[in-house]
Structures are given as C-alpha cells and as structure tokens.
Image: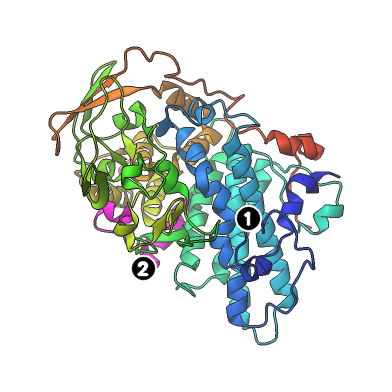
Amino acid sequence: MKYAKNIYTKLIALLPFALLGACSEDFLERPPKDAIVDAGFYQTDDQVLASTSLLYSKVWFDYNDKASYNLGDFRAGTAFSAWNDRGNVLFNTTGNTPENGSAWRSFFIVVGQSNLAIQNIQKYAGASVSEVVKKHAIAEARFMRALAYRFLVMNWGAVPVIENNLTLLSDTTVQRNTPKSVWKFVTTEMRQIAEDLPEKPMRVGRLTRWSAEGMLARFYLARAGVEANASGQRNQVFLDSAKYYADRVITLSGASLLPKYESLFRYPYDNNAESLFSLQWVYSPGAWGTQNSTPAYLAYGPDIANGDGWGGDKGATWWVMQQYEGIKTVSETVLQGRTVDQRLKATFMLPGASYPEITQTIPGGSQKLVFPFVGTDNNFIAIKKYITGKAVDVGGQAAQQNYGHDTYMMRLAEMYLTYAEAVLGNAASTTDSKALQYFNHVHTRAGLSPVTGALTFDQIFKERIVEFAMEGMAWYDLVSLHYYNPTKAYAILNAQDRGFFFTKPDRFPDPTSWTFTKTAWATAERKIDANSGNFLLPIPSAELSQAPNLQKPAVDYQRK
C-alpha cells in the first residue's frame, strides 16, 4: 500500500522529539532516525503537558499560514486577491492548488500527531504522572484530532478516519469514510472529551470543558443539516443539542464578550475573556512553525509591516461590503454610505480610516496609520483583522513572517449566534425572546440598534458573515447550509460580485462616508459558478497518485 508515502509517513514524527529538537523545520516531515519513541520523556506532569503543547501551534502551521483565509474567506466570497490565489477566489480550486494541498497535509498532521500523543501517553507515562494530567493531555489530543476531522469532512466530504497511524502502515484495507459516519465519530469523541477536560484551563491558553462543549454546539448545528430529511428539514434532535451546549457555554463558562469589538484584534489580545479556543503562537526568532506567519501575507504594505506586508492586492469583496448596515445600493455599479457597525473598521481598512495603534512609515519619518487613498478607478479595502503593526507596536515581538499573536478558533460570539440559529431551526422566523436576546448581544456590541420582532435565517447568516469575516469561518457556514439546502448555498455564492471596484472617501482623512464604484473595464471574473461538481474540494492530486484507496467508494466508519 502507498498511503504511507505521501501523508502518513509524515505523521510518524513524534512530539517529544520536536520539543527536544528545538522545533526544527522538518520535524513533521520524517520520522526520527534513531527511534520512534523516547520512552523516558513522559515521566512528570510537566513533561506530559509539554508533549501536547505543539498541538496548539506547529501542527496547524500549514493551515494557518495561507490556507485558512484562502479556503475560509476567498472561497466564501468575503475577501479576494486581485493577482494571487485566483483559483480559490474564482471557485476553481483544483487538486494542484497549493492551499488545497497544504490544508489537507496540515489536518492529517494534526490527526497523526494527536494519535501518537495519545498512544505514547497511554504507554509511557511514568508512575509519578497524575491521572488528572494524563487524562487532560489525552483529551487535548483527541480534541485536536476531532477538530481536524471537522475541517476534513467539511472541505473534502468522505475522508479516511485514522485513529492509529502506526497500524495503518501495514493495513491495506483503509479507505474513505462517509461524511455521516465521520460526523458521528467527531461528535461522539467530543462528548467524552468534554467530560475529561477541566472547567478552568490547566495552563494559560489550554483547552477547557467549555472549549469542547462549544465545539459540540458547532458540531451539532452542522450535523443537523448532515442528517436532514428528504425535504431539507434539519434533524431536530441535533438542533436541540446545539442549543443545549451553546447555552451551557454562555451561562456556565464564565466567558464574556469584550466590550469593544476592535479589542479582539488589538495587541495584546491573546487568551482574552471571549476566547474559547485559540491557536497559541509565539514570537520565535530563529525558529519556524511555532510563530504566526499569516499577517505577513495580509498586511497591505511594508510601511506597516516588518520586512513583509505582501497583501496589497487583498481586500474586501463588493459582496461583503453590501452586508454592512448603512452601505446602501445606489445602482448596479454604485454603493454609498457609512456604517456605525464597528466591525467594518476592525476587519477592513477603508481610505482615510485611522489606526493609532499601528505605526506607519512615511517619507522622512513615521506616523500613526491613516489608510492611504490611492488609485483612480480601482483600489483595495485592505485587511485589518490580525494586523497589529510593527515591532514597536507590539513590544518588540514581531519580525518578518514572525508574529506572536494567537488565531481564534472559537469565541463566545459564535455561541450566541449558534443558539439563535438552533432555536430558529426549520422555521421561517422566530420571536423566541432568548434567541433575540442572544443575537442582540452580538449585534449591539458592534454599535447597532437591537433587532426586534422576528429573527430569520438570513439575518443570522448575515450577522455571522460580518462578525467572523477574515477569521476563516464563512466557508464553513456555507458548507453547513449546503448540507440541507444546497440550492440556497449556490444562490448566495453565485450572486456575489468578486471583481474590482474603487472606494472614494468624502474627505481625507477621517471620512464620514464612502462611494464604491465598480471598475468599468473589469467586467470579467466578477462572478463564479458554484455547483454540485465543484462545491467540495478535490483531494490533492499528489495524494490520489500515491493512495489509490482514496478513489474507492466511501464506507461507514466502524470503530474497532
């Protein structure tokens, strides 16, 4: 069998060796030459916890680097790149698209490293290791594996469930498993994980019971669509489960929304009161893979960066601008207005907007950032979210492709909106007071007036888009919708405009409104054609060529 050659031999490298080897760049790419296991490593509580620490960072690096926004936002239509990543922007992701391969590889590295951590802790943990720590570390690894499979099944559909990558090397029967059985596996896993994790983090940034119960709310909301009936009615039991777990996290976790939305992405924001689970990056000069590299590709230019700033052609799409309250449609080619929604300024940079927390280099010196107004018939509403500025702005903790701030994987705002959607369920609207209350916690935090009366799916979906834009979330909201209503998912995608436009402020700086005009000469590649043939990602070509079993029909996963 050739499964091992391309993915799974990469999964044999062991976390203790990564830790002891000072995070060398290739520790996930090959097994250690001298031994598979350092049996003497797991002798204390600190060593066992250290063995799972890189599950919070390095194993996710290839996904976080560029794939997270390529899949989560470019394919979803919340942002676009004018010159790069065009396959994802235009919904033409192929088996050879780089971000397709890097995401697949990263998720299976998470799976493999999690499997090995579980096996090694069970086998080698010394007598002095407490049962509490042992159970916690195993639960961390199981959590990461389940989350990786959530990404895998939502992007590629049927995928092979691997719980022991050592026996896999001699197993010639492994093939893809059906999406329904993968979802059953991850929700069953997460229920047990929630029981094994503490209510308070064992270390700063570590998982808690509420991280797991938040994932259960997320999983059950999606699974309700996976197991919808023939009429497209979502499974009510799973909707009720999503509601139950979301409410528990909201009321029992002690987490709270930050008063100001912009504070979520202003240094230092790591492990704040709203974060339920974040990837734990560190500024690490001389190392590679434990730092956050993504800001290098999103910052619009070197004048606000640290020897990088390669995101000058990236920005908000015309479609996402239409989602912000106060931005009005004047005609087919013109939008105009302003919004009091604080999320726009915290997510994207419009000409004339000021960011005093970021230093901008200018001829002869520097100033607090004012986003430039340039161009004549096209420009870009640049990415702001996760851009924290130069080293001077972050206590010296930044260098080229090397940033220390965390990546949100789940925050409390999602639980409020998950509850509202689960209550809405299969109805056209809901007037449930608690659903409205929870929805409005998110809505009014952004500076908007509370919604009264009935709440609809379109309102909740729109709220999720503007709340989580550039957090790699929008694509998975569309996949969840596609599970039970593919026609609506295609309609949303195919109605989007992903082309060039020009943004003009009414004054510079500190504008009060903007006019957005579609670029007249840029008529091609404004729309996409999403359909049943291209909605899911194709399995990367390199994997198919080495793993013929991936082309066999999927079977239900049966735990052995």
Query: Residue 338 magenta-drawn?
Result: no
Amino acid type, residue under disc 2 in the picture: Gly
Q: Is residue 408 above or below residue 515?
A: below
The answer to whether marks 1 and 2 mark residues whose Cβ atoms lie closer than 8 Å is: no
Give percent across and percent down for residue 64. 51, 49
Residue sitting farthest toward the bottom: 128
Q: Nearer the viewer, residue 364 or 186?
A: 364
Q: What residue sits right under mark 1 in the picture?
A: 110
Q: Nearer the viewer, residue 265 or 360?
A: 360
- Going from N to C along the chain, the mark reached first, 1 or 2, is 1
Mark yes or no: residue 372 visible: yes
Name which quarter of the figure residue 542 lies in.
Answer: top right
Give percent across and percent down for residue 264. 32, 55
Q: Is residue 37 above or below residue 149?
A: below
For the C terminus, give its image quadrant.
Answer: bottom right
Query: Residue 253 magenta-drawn?
Result: yes
Q: Nearer the viewer, residue 529 or 419?
A: 529
Number of residues whose C-alpha sits closer than 10 Å to that of mark 2, classed few (under 14), some (14–19) or many (20 or more): few
Give percent across and percent down for residue 180. 65, 43
Query: Residue at point 39% right, 32% down?
Result: 313
Look at the image and give the residue range highlighted in magenta. 242-268
Residue sitting farthest toward the front: 364
Cα–Cα gap, marks 1 and 2: 29 Å
Q: What residue sits right under mark 2 in the picture?
A: 254
Name which quarter of the figure residue 82 lies in.
Answer: top left
Query: Residue at point 58% right, 41% down?
Result: 154
Q: State the SS at label 2.
A: loop
Mark in the foreground, 1 or 2: 1
Amino acid type, residue under disc 1 in the picture: Val
Q: State the SS at label 1.
A: helix
